[in-house]
Image: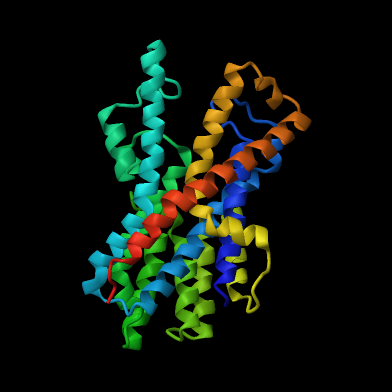
Amino acid sequence: MRLQNIDFLRGLAVSMVVLVHSTSSTLPWIEESILHKVFEFGKYGVEIFFVISGYIICYSLYNHNYSFKKSFNFLLRRIIRINPPAYIILIFYLLIEVFVFALNGRHLILSQPFETNQVISNFLFLTNAFNTDLYLETFWTLETELQFYLFIAFTFPLIINKIELIRYISLAGLIIFGFLDTPFALSVHFTCFLLGIIYFMMQNNMINKKIFIISLIPCVSIFLLNGQYFELLFSLFSLFVLFVNEPIKSKVFQFLGRISFSLYIVHIFVFIYLDVILNKIGWNFLHETITSKFLLVIIYYGIAILISTIFYEFVEKPFINYSKRISMK
């Protein structure tokens, strides 16, 4: 497997998510259209992201000779990598609400954006646990990702244990966890992460191909039992790409893959306020016909990529570099 294919998958996944959000009623004044129904499959891009995380986090920990004593540094690296860029977007969101309220005495998007529980839960990425509304719809995945990091920090040493029996028992435990209905956000999408984990285990000879195939059976069963047919399809597609030995060459998807996190957390913010502007100047009729809507999607997409590229260079990349300074030795 070439790591270039990870960027390809990320680029594909973020393109799917951006596409579905640019055509949907996620935006404040938009009704669902035929165009949204055509591109609704884009929501399954998150499954691709989760399979990638299951694999690439294990890959990274293994290369750093991970052990329990490194759990704090690992989690700190991930928090520095993920949280500050997301916080910057959330702060901008709230500042705009403050500005608009100061001008006309009412909030722009949410009726009560500064309700204490909502502020705390959004900044802790625990809206599922607090049962509060998200400021930005796409941020629900950050809660799931951060829970996975916490989960893998304490289970990974068992997964890679030198004793074969411990590895197999650990794998069985992961599969059983996938069947459980827990109150954690991770629970709903855990099987996607699990597919990435078992592929990692097979690739690094921690389980053989026979055990890998046997492990796939309960994973597939979890998707089917929950009626997650398309989630299964795109998760298995992700596994297929991981299996490909040759790098998949696509400059567009490679580029989008590199900026995928920035694009993911920025795009919905950009779309919301582009739509606000469109509504204020009375041009929201552009959402009404398929032709004008399609043109609008292209424009929204292009602006989101431009802003995300700038965000990546001046916000995300510095935090990536800073997180790497935290030792994993």
Task: From the top left corner, tell me how far across and down residue 70 is, in percent.
Answer: 25, 71
Task: Locate residue 306 relative to residue 119 in the image: left or right.
Answer: right
Residue at left 63%, top 37%?
Answer: 300
Q: Is residue 109 left or right of residue 21?
A: left
Location of residue 288 by image quarter: top right
Q: Quadrant of residue 123?
A: top left
Q: Is residue 185 visible?
A: no
Give me the residue at 73% from left, 34% from top. Answer: 295
Which color scheme is applied? rainbow
Labels in figure, total: 0
Q: Residue furthest left?
A: 69
Q: Is residue 88 above or below residue 45?
A: above
Q: What's the residue at 35%, 66% (across, down)? A: 324
Q: Residue 315, can we see it?
A: yes
Residue at position x 66%, y 70% from top? Answer: 248
Q: Is residue 281 above or below residue 223?
A: above
- State whether residue 260 is above or below residue 96: below
Q: Could you tell me which quadrant the C terminus lies in?
A: bottom left
Observer-nearest of 88 and 206: 88
Spot occupied by residue 195 in the image (x, y as percentages of width and height): 49, 68
Quarter in which the N terminus is drawn: bottom right
Seen from the viewer's position, the closer of residues 109 and 323 is 323
Task: Please determine whether, in this image, residue 164 is positioned above or below residue 90.
Answer: below
Q: Position of residue 322 (x, y in %)?
A: 33, 60
Q: Residue furthest right?
A: 291
Q: Residue 269 placed where, x, y %?
A: 49, 36
